[in-house]
Image: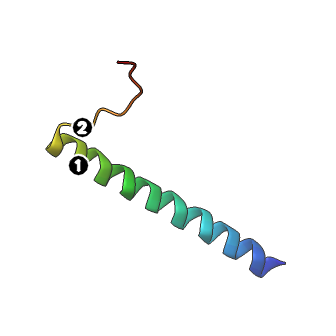
């Protein structure tokens, strides 16, 4: 049970760090490309 708790905590930390890295990369990509307009339009 202790091993499961340790794995869960490490998993939480890794997912949080990866989320922050992906968000940073996304923000850089948006600044470089000017962003993408995604939405629904009725013509």
Residue 13 vs residue 17: left or right? right
- Whether residues under marks 1 and 2 lie with C-beta atoms below 8 angstroms apart, the answer is no
Q: Quadrant of residue 38?
A: top left
Q: Which residue is mark 2?
A: 35
Count residues near mark 1 (Cα–Cα under 10 Å), then give few for <14, some for 14-19, many for 20+: few
The structure residue drawn at horizontal position 53% and vertical position 62%, both measured from the top left corner, is: 15
From this view, report whether residue 16 is shown above or below residue 41.
below
Count residues near mark 2 (Cα–Cα under 10 Å), then give few for <14, some for 14-19, many for 20+: few
User: Could you tell me which quadrant the N terminus lies in?
Assistant: bottom right
Q: Residue furthest front?
A: 43
From this view, report whether residue 22 is shown above or below residue 28.
below
Earlier sequence position, callout 1 versus callout 2 = 1
From this view, report whether residue 36 is shown above or below residue 28.
above
The structure residue drawn at horizontal position 37% and vertical position 50%, both measured from the top left corner, is: 23
Residue 2 vs residue 20: left or right? right
Q: Which mark is residue 38?
A: none
* Mark 1 element type: helix
User: Could you tell me which quadrant the C terminus lies in?
Assistant: top left
Q: Which mark is residue 29?
A: 1
């Amino acid at each position: 049970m202790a091993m499961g708790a340790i794995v869960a905590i490490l998993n939480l930390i890794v997912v949080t760090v990866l989320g922050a890295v992906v968000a940073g990369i996304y923000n850089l990509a948006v600044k470089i490309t000017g962003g993408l307009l995604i939405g629904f339009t009725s013509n």
